[in-house]
Image: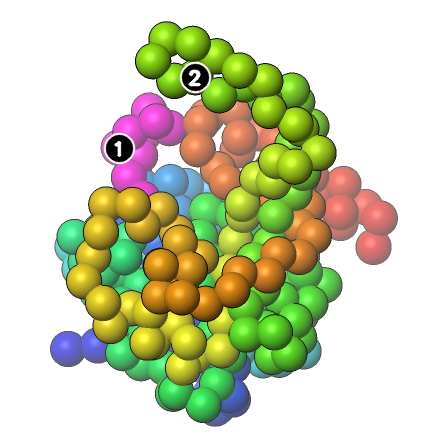
Amino acid sequence: MDQVISSNSSNAQKAYAIIVAGGSGTRMQSAVPKQFLLLNGKPVLMHTLHAFSQSTYKPELIVVLPETYHSYWRELCNEHHFTITHQVVSGGATRFHSVKNGLDEVDTNSLVAIHDAVRPLISTTIIDDAYEQAMVKGSAIVCVQSRDSVRQVKENKSESLLRDEIYLVQTPQTFQAQILKQAYSYSYQESFTDDASVVEKAGHAIHIIPGSYNNFKITFPDDIAIAEFLLCKKATNL
């Protein structure tokens, strides 16, 4: 049974954001999954949902969360008086299956963004640009160019790659819903590393748009301190 946590407002729009929150706390050295860790006094996931709620597209928010954490998330929402409307659905065995569960709640004639719950510093400008570009081109994958030299290792031999041709993929990954639904109708493959790889396998072109180096994925303990610094800096500049 799907769970809906909502405020008094209605967000029935032709845009959706599926927030994938299936991570664990292993690399964070934490017993609590990283999407629930406190960032400036609030769980990381709440910052992410807030960013999407500020989009001019006003997407309907769908949080894909392991079923074992549904009640814990409800408690956190009550504790932090979190009232941004969102729906909670159960995650699957892999990220692919979790996204597929979220897509079941999406209308075909719409736009849908898939975003990692633990990228709380995503800007509203990038979110809006992704929706706009996906509307025109079918897809919009947020990326940044590599700042470092890159080498590829195969069979214990390494070779240099052209840094200017290397892009680091982030989220949101935004699509016309009919394209995404068609791609996710196929069976899971281990080569599926993200939504773009699923859509590409289904024969669709992938379009990339500029992201931000601040839109990093919280993975290690130091990342929380960096994110808090950037949030404080942003608040000071407002």
Q: Tell me, what colour scheme is on the image?
A: rainbow
Q: Which residues are magenta?
A: 23-32
User: In the image, what residue type sits under mark 1?
Assistant: Ala
Helix, strand or loop for disc 1: loop
Tell which of 147 and 233 is nearer to you. Answer: 147
Image x and y of residue 31, in percent: 26, 32
Is residue 82 among the parts visible in the rendering? no
| 52 sits to left or right of 182 | right
Majority SS type along the magenta span: loop
- What residue is at 52 percent from the left and 24 percent from the top? 222
Kindly identify which residue carries mark 2: 153
Looking at the picture, does residue 211 appear above or below residue 14? above
Helix, strand or loop for disc 2: strand
Is residue 126 among the parts visible in the rendering? yes
Kindly identify which residue carries mark 1: 31
Answer whether residue 227 is magenta in the image: no
| Foreground label between 2 and 1 | 2
- What residue is at 22 percent from the left and 51 percent from the top? 189
Mark 1: few, some, or many residues within 10 Å (few <14, many ≥20)?
A: few
